[in-house]
Amino acid sequence: MSVDTATVAKIASLARLKVTEADLAAMVPELNGILAWVEQLGEVDVTGVEPMTAVIPNHLRLREDAVTDGGIRDAVLANAPAPEHGFFGVPKVIE
Amino acid sequence: MTDLTELGVAAIREGVAKGDFTAVEVAEAFNANVAAAQGSLNAFIVATPEAALEAARKVDADRAGGKALGKMAGVPIGMKDLFATRGVQTTAASHILEGFTPQYESTVSQKLWDAGAGMLGKLNLDQFAMGSSNETSYFGNVVSPWRRAGGDNAPLAPGGSSGGSSAAIAARLCPAATGTDTGGSIRQPAAFTGTTGIKPTYGRCSRWGVVAFASSLDQAGPMARSVRDCAIMLEAMAGFDPKDSTSLDLPVPEWEAGLSANLAGKKVGIPREYRMDGMDAEVAKSWDDGIAWLKDAGAEIVDISLPHTKYALPTYYIIAPAEASSNLARYDGVRYGLRDLPDGANLQDMYAATRAAGFGDEVKRRILIGTYVLSAGFYDAYYTQAQKVRTLISRDFEAAFGHCDVILAPTTPTAAFALGENSDDPLAMYLNDVFSVPASLAGLPAMSVPAGLNSQGLPLGLQLIGKPFDEQGVLNAGLAIESRAGFTAKPEKWW
């Protein structure tokens, strides 16, 4: 499978990456080179093989249903680029 | 007086404990080396000489007060700038996190401070740990302290992604440093710089507070100049952490006390698929040296097969970008880091502009690949297929460990290359990790130890891969090589 400019533009939009026409022109052959190389996985017979989910056997733990953290609003906001009134600030999202 | 910066972790800890020198003297000596090398090697993004001194003063005071000293007491270290450090900028070598000052400390760094270590600074790396040459950092390339013999002064790559760590250790800017390894990011830079580093079993070291790249692969580990120093530091870094859902709830073994270079009764596997056509003759020769050394240590050498080896790299370059594209979705210009808000932009425009401005080319490339292989219609063909092949790669190791205790292979296909040599071709760069990626995909402990110098005077590393949880077996085989290789070479100081 190979990608064209329109596909890369679509992927970039899904990934929320702004790209210029020039970026796209450079990216298409690069991504096609990488995709052509990973295609070789298609030749591996994986009949009856389960996809890997955990590399080292481990079980997911449950913890006690209790409040163990919180009350640190200022610390949470300390690195926000535009905090307002104790909240994260974003551009207007409703018209 | 001894040059304190020539000492390793064990020697510093012992000297401080005995009173041969103070922790403050050690910190001052390393602080001076860090400052003197910064303009030439660019190993650190931020130096923190005061933090190193403060930790050292506390150790000296504890010793004077007769208090028990920790495993790393008086040892100043470099901290890869992927670990969140409270009050000290943490960037993952990216523009998008420039200025980010964590309000919390990563579990691994906290454990090291609790053990008496001090921080010399935050080490440069490939951006978001994506790279094998330290050329993707927003804060500039790290230059290896090594140069080719014969007057060619071309700046060489220190490896990546832990390139600041490897360069700093080789140049005596720190006796040890933290690294992280996703597909070889501890082992490959260690091999390129004549240093030693171990990636433990996946889950040994907490990932909490470590900037995420590919969560099913990321694992922290120590880098230093000897196997013993790595064992000491790994003991201080490892341990169960309820804040990491994949953390192993197991006691931390006493790896240092368990060190033994006697391999009598042990079997060492030599994977035939790693002996590739057109292999660098000097790398092949160092591998043969390693085999002879391990035989001399009492081990039996057995031929093993890891049939899916050739598929490991393409598998990795689907899984790692897929996980990265998901992990890096968090950089949105809202909660922390860079925000780029063009005039009149809406929220979606702001996300796209921020991420375009904040990520470097290699990071964008991997986000795009990852987004593509996870997108509707392609998920099964790429991602599910890769996860199935990953199962087969893991089974290869399981079967091989039915016949041997530890595996010996080269760490890298070549010695260090020059900066710029591979940077135009992403695929050529990816091939550097051909020997290190398989163990990462299987979550196995693996280490690189220096084996010698090639004809250009550059270090070559040998890799040891162990069974899950058997860091001890890996360290012991590493020690057997270290004690026979007699590697004492260090880069001639030019910086």
Image (cartoon, coloured by chain):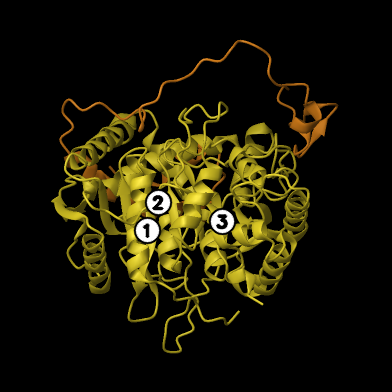
Chain colours: A orange, B yellow
First along the sequence among labels 1 and 2 = 2
Q: Tell me, for residue B479, which label it has, or none.
A: 1
- Residue identified by numbered label 3: B177
Left or right of B142, for residue B468: left
* Left or right of B53, for residue B398: left
Subunit that carries the residue with mark 2: B
Q: Where is residue B230 shown, x and y percent of the image?
A: 48, 54
Mark 3 element type: strand
Name the amino acid type tagged 3: Ala
Check the picture and name the quadrant holding the C terminus of chain B: bottom right
Inter-mark Cα distance, 1 to 2: 8 Å
Crowding near pointer 3: few (<14 within 10 Å), some, many (20+)? Answer: many
Q: Say if residue A14 shows up in the picture.
A: no
Q: Check if mark 1 and mark 2 are on a common chain.
A: yes
Q: Chain of mark 3?
A: B
SS of the residue under disc 2:
loop
Q: Amino acid at mark 1?
A: Leu
Label 1 element class: helix
> Farthest residue in the right direction?
A85
Q: Residue at x 15, y 28 (%)?
A: A47
Is the residue marked by circle 1 packed among few (<14), some (14-19), or many (20+) residues within 10 Å? many
Q: Residue at x 22, y 62 (%)?
A: B291
Residue B462 appears at what percent x and percent y? 33, 61
* Mark 3–mark 1 CB contact (< 8 Å): no
Which residue bears the numbered disc 2?
Answer: B259
* Residue that sits furthest to the bottom in the current view: B151
Q: Nearer the viewer, residue B90 or B301?
A: B301
Q: Nearer the viewer, residue B280 or B344?
A: B280
